Image (cartoon, rainbow, N blue to C red):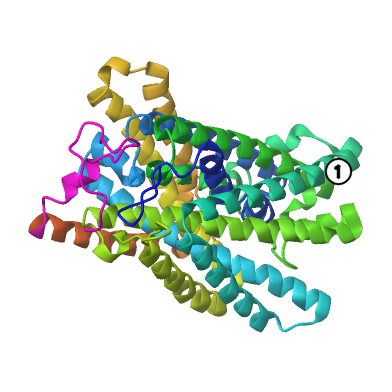
Amino acid sequence: MATSGTGLARGAIGLREVLFQSVTSMAPAGAVALSIAAGATYAGGALPLAVLLALIACMLVAISIGQLAKHLPSAGSIYTYPAEAIHPALGFLVGWGYALVEALIGPLTMVLFGYLFGSIANSEWGWPFTTTWVIFMIVGAILLAGLNYRGIQVSAQAGTLLGLFEIVVFVLLAIWLVAKAGSHNTFNVFTLHFATIKGYKGFSGIAAGSIYTILAFVGFEASAPLAEEARNPRRTIQVAVVASCLAIGLFYVFTTYAGAVFTGPDKFVSFGALGGGSPWIQLGRDAWGLGWVVVFLAIVNSTFANGNAGTLATTRTWYAMARIRLLPSPLARVHPRWNSPFVGVAVQLVVTLAIGLPIGLHFGPTVAFVFLATILTGIMIAIYMVFNLSCLLYYLRKRRGEFNVLLHAVIPVVGILAFIPAWLTALGLGSSFLKFVTPLSYPASETGLAIGIWYLIGLVVLGYLYARHPERLPEMKKVFADDGVPSGEPVASGEAA
């Protein structure tokens, strides 16, 4: 039963809602139409290969997260895993990075939300582009905050409906494109044969393109912070993380393949230019005539649902860190009626507008999207690698009797190795001695600097906590389980600190 006013609403949602929290966090239609499409700038006609490799890498970390979630269900799961398995200091740095990542999903998705409406309104009716996208971004951000303010049940149910609609539309469109491609269907798009972009030929193009295909997967882990509001979280979170990653990953592979063979792999670089809203809107026009409107609505729906799911994960992570006094205590306050972390929702609204509007106006919404997306991906790849390491060390140190060589050693280690090329490319590291690392275009090339500054601030905060409040960091290991009794540690109050 959900409680009122003293903490998050325990037991308020089931597997379906938790599963679609991950699904909508991945933004299936929006990812295919926007983030994956951006990867064509580097991978060209070999983009389906970059998607397939991202699926494999993300499935490995999804398995590791699932194994950790069996024993560590908590709204602070993102930082609880490394804090318990390795060290609280690393847990703090993971939580610090994730707090930024999820906070960026708001401005990233709402910039795209405004951009989509602005592009279509400008091309169809001649409305002023900048004014239109800014207005729709602000309206979208306010609607998003209102939805999250109403609590987990309303937000999660909305996510389920929105997620189903976008998936059905894009699967039907992809089937049509594959059938229309006829003899042009080819599996060479899953090789380096079409990785021919100047400056990014061969695997360097795949590594650069993988930054944006991995971005499409970011969010499959977003169900984990809902552990305290889910029924039977030890099983529910595990199933949701793995199932969403596999199902939506296959969806990405199929739809990207369909777009490549219909357009022509040798012409697919043009997909990277996000003009007119999205190249998939043009595919919708080619396939269904006026039915392009349905494709447009699916993409807009996906973007909004992604923002909704991201805000859910953001505010729960902030709530968990504030509860143990690692972030300002107001972020742990919940609404007396809706059991939503309403202060966090308000802060997220401010962050969305404060970051999204100035960056979008300065660079333009498409460049702003690529810039924010590259920062987000660079941090998340590092966090995914830490999750894999956490799985290995947790079962070696804490659950030796359950240790399985395949699940708890081979999969985590291979998972870490699989992310290294895209991570180094996103940060711009190793280009002097690694042939596959080619610098990205500006401003995405400044990703390493932006991440470095954020983590420098995080290290200062960590030093302050060690010096003034050393007792707070070990609390990151506490697990607030489904029955209210933590696993292996004394339970702390769920009330705001």
Placement of 187 over or under 202, stated as above or below: above
Q: Position of residue 233 (x, y in %)?
A: 41, 35
Q: Which residue is mark 1?
A: 176
Foreground of the two, 343 or 272: 343
Residue at position x 37%, y 38% in the image: 387
- Residue nearest the viewer, comparing 493 with 436: 493
The C terminus is located in which quarter? Answer: bottom left
Horizontal side, residue 59 vs residue 409: left or right:
right
Q: Which residue does the image show at 70% across and 80% down from the upper left?
A: 129
Residue 486 highlighted magenta (yes or no): yes
User: Is 469 on the left-hand or right-hand side of 270?
Assistant: left
Q: Position of residue 71 (x, y in %)?
A: 33, 30
Q: Position of residue 379 (x, y in %)?
A: 41, 52
In which quadrant will I find the N terminus? top left
Q: In the displayed structure, does residue 294 sit left or right of residue 42? A: right
The percent coordinates of residue 172 (x first, y second) are 80, 43
- Decide if residue 37 is on the left or right side of residue 296: left
Q: Is residue 410 visible?
A: yes
Between 111 and 410, the residue placed more toward the observer is 111
Kind of residue sitting beneath label 1: Trp
- SS at circle 1: helix
Q: Quadrant of residue 56?
A: top right
Specify the segment rendered in magenta.
468-497
Crowding at mark 1 (Cα within 10 Å: few <14, some 14-19, many 20+): some
Residue at 12 percent across and 54 percent down: it is 466
Q: Is residue 120 magenta?
A: no
Front residue of 293/418: it is 293
Residue 367 makes an appearance in the image: no
Label count reads 1
Question: How would you classify the magenta stretch by its main secondary structure?
Answer: loop
Tell me the residue at 50%/78% (across/down). 358
